[in-house]
Amino acid sequence: MQDLKTKVWTRISLIALAAVLTAGVFAGGVLVRANVDAQDGTPVPRRTAYVDFLSLLKSDRLLLGKQQEMAESMQRQMDDIDKRFGKLIQEQARIRELNKPDTIAYRQAMNKQLELERQRYQEKLLFEQLTQAELRDFAIDRFKKLRNLAADIAKGKGYNEVLNIVRNIDDVTGGQNDFQALQQQLLVSPVLYYESAHDITDAVTKKADELWGETISFVVWDEETKAGGIQFSIVDPANPEEPGKPVVRNAAGEIEIRLGQQGAFKISVLDKEEPAVSPRDRVNWSKRGVNVGDLGASAGAYIAPEKFPPNGDTFTVTVRSMVDPTVSETVTIRLLDKDGKPMPAEEE
């Protein structure tokens, strides 16, 4: 089953893209058209530039960051709603188990459980609608800024019109090869041929990076040198202020942690290839797995579970820059028993 967070990310990505498409911003493929006629009434020939605007929008770091921020916010909110209503629903389910179906107590518990399910769904739906509206407004604002930037660059190069093009049809169709895919391409861009010398996409991309690009990066894991990336140091509960040396990853590049162990994750954050300083070094930690322990979102503090999770002995930990949410790193964690041995085969 596809992970909920992946579904949220996909749905939010589509919202951002649909926001500008449904707003009619690509109508006729024309992004910008200056006054074609001169002030004295003499017609001025069109001088047309071309830009792959869809690729600009899909790679816009501010929009990507907003999408990631909204996806994680929605994930947290959905988890909170499930946790809050889950306890109440389980209470009613237990009452039903203790009573026969023809009793008043059973019917009352059933009605309460159904009402709680309805409230949970309604709360999730409301939050998702609010998230969609916020992201739609942000996407349209980013479109306008990128459109104005394309106009300024085009005018600076002597053009008086900009048409939208599609460099790679797969960016629009997702790799589909059918008539519907062709229709999608023509909807976004009716331009069938253009001279590449008049394609200003790269110039707009470069300027957008100068204006809105970020300089945050991570020291990522190097498979050859076995260095960098996410590190985990074990902490002695009796002396929590002095974490031990980082755990050496196994041959598969996994971090091995024993059941019940405490420690902290960390990663080196760079700003313009130099060590980042606060607050630009802020990161957010998250884990994916069921009953895999407790992880502090901001500090990376982690406490392993006391027993192996029901879905296996591995899970993933992801760190993401809070300054630039598009910068992230993920590592696989493998849990061992308290003697440092792997999960018994019969438990897998």
Image: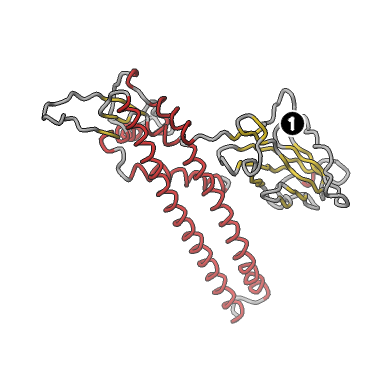
Q: Nearer the viewer, residue 141 or 124?
A: 141
Q: Nearer the viewer, residue 70 or 243?
A: 243
Where residue 241 appears, as percent x and y from the top left, is 83, 48
SS for callout 1:
loop
In which image quadrant can residue 231 be found?
top right
Residue name at image x 48 percent, y 55 percent: 128
- Residue 344 in view (yes/no): no
Q: Nearer the viewer, residue 312 or 147?
A: 147
Residue holding disc 1: 252
Where residue 201 appears, as percent x and y from the top left, is 39, 26
Q: How crowded is the residue under tag 1: few (<14 C-alpha within 10 Å), some, or many (20+)?
A: few
Residue name at image x 30 percent, y 21 percent: 194
Where residue 285 appears, as percent x and y from the top left, is 66, 46
**Where is 122 relative to 314, above or below?**
below
Q: Amino acid at mark 1?
A: Ala
Quarter of the picture holding the C terminus? top right
Q: Nearer the viewer, residue 3 or 261?
A: 261
Residue name at image x 50 percent, y 67 percent: 118
The residue lying furthest to the bottom in this view is 104
